[in-house]
Image (cartoon, grey):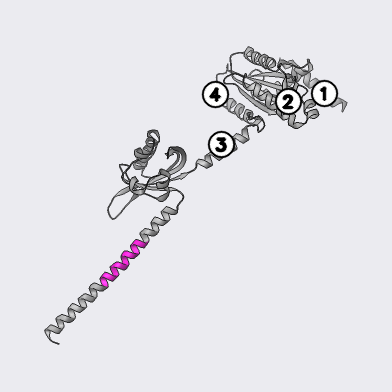
Amino acid sequence: MNRQSLEHENIESLKKKITDLEKREKELLKKLDYHTSLRAMVLDALPINVFLEEPDGKTIFANKQACQMNGMKLEDLIGKTVFDFFPKHIAEMNRKMDLEVWQKRDLITCELKAGFKGKEHHMFTGRTIIHVPESGEEYLLGFGLDITELKLAQKQISHMAYHDALTGLPNRWFIKSYLEQYQAEQRNPNEMLGLILLDLDHFKIINDSLGHQAGDVLLQSVADRLKTETGTGNILARFGGDEFIILLPHLNGVEDAVEISQLVLNLMEEPFCVHSQNFKITPSIGISIHPFHGEDINTLIKNADIAMYHSKEKGRNRYSLFTPNMKKQALTEMEKITAAI
């Protein structure tokens, strides 16, 4: 083979190698584009906000969900910090968490408030630091899951659990929970709490004669009237049936509880209109004071109940402050009933 033929053969061989290399490079780039696109599709498919920040807080990536929640395109988010798209107080909370992650260099999760498109959202969010071995660079990787609807549902469930469906007032579980917390807290031993228990006289007659719907309307009317005059800081609750409780957490003296009880009697003097008929209904009221008439929940309620029945025995439409003698009388009556059985 002559020199010219050999050179031609080498050139052709080199061309083939170059062609093969170009083909292989295209295949590698195609695979790289595919994997990059696949990763982007995976991140965009997630129902959570995913974002990547530089140490100074500038955004270098945000997935589709994060862009949509902010109402911005990716190119508009790039280079921006939380101070560019969150209200100042929310941005400061987020940035504080970012700096804590950079300091601890560990995953941190918490619940935060965030503002998107002018609306406040509750987010379950997390951040961590990722290290790129090839370049030695580090970035903050964050995620956020919108739990606003979950929080709202929890709030509604909690409200339903601790409030009466008919009147919207706190219920017996609210009262018991409140008193348990009150008892658990370290308080001034001289601090008093008043418990007023009132029962509607002859309510059963109205309920039975006009029907439960009329009875419900009457209970709602009573609740509405009592709401207006129970005093600031006091708690009005429906304890069950036709019984209501007024808690007086900041009692200056027994006379305060007596004054509220008299106010309730005055309020109830005006007849109630139910289904175009006027009804005058009176309350029988019992009062117990913490800590004099009981230091635990059940004793306080029980003694107020004893005082309330004392008011009924004395002719109804009145209040009675619990005394130890009332309890003795109640026990004596119970012994008589038990002996008769």
* Residue 48 pos. (x, y %): 45, 48
Residue 239 quadrant: top right
Q: Name the residue under label 4.
A: 186
- Look at label 1 and name its amino acid: Glu
Looking at the image, residue 324 lies above or below residue 240: above
Report the residue marked by disc 1.
335
Q: Nearer the viewer, residue 214 or 29?
A: 214
Where are the magenta residues, as a range?
Answer: 20-34
| Number of other residues with Cα within 10 Å of mark 2, as a class: few under 14, some 14 to 19, many 20 or more | some
Disc 3 versus disc 4: nearer the observer: 3
* Picture layout, residue 17 above or below residue 58: below
How many angstroms separate mark 4 from mark 1 (CA)?
A: 39 Å
Mark 3 highlights which residue? 155
> What residue is shown with label 2?
274
Q: Quadrant of residue 125?
A: top left
Q: Upstream in the sequence, badge 1 or badge 2?
A: 2
Q: Position of residue 312 (x, y in %)?
A: 77, 18
Q: Earlier in the sequence, mark 4 or mark 1?
A: 4
Of the image marks 2 and 3, the number of the one nearer the N terminus: 3
Residue 263 in picture, x, y percent from top left = 66, 15
User: Left or right of 40: which side holds 149?
Assistant: right
Q: Residue furthest top?
A: 255
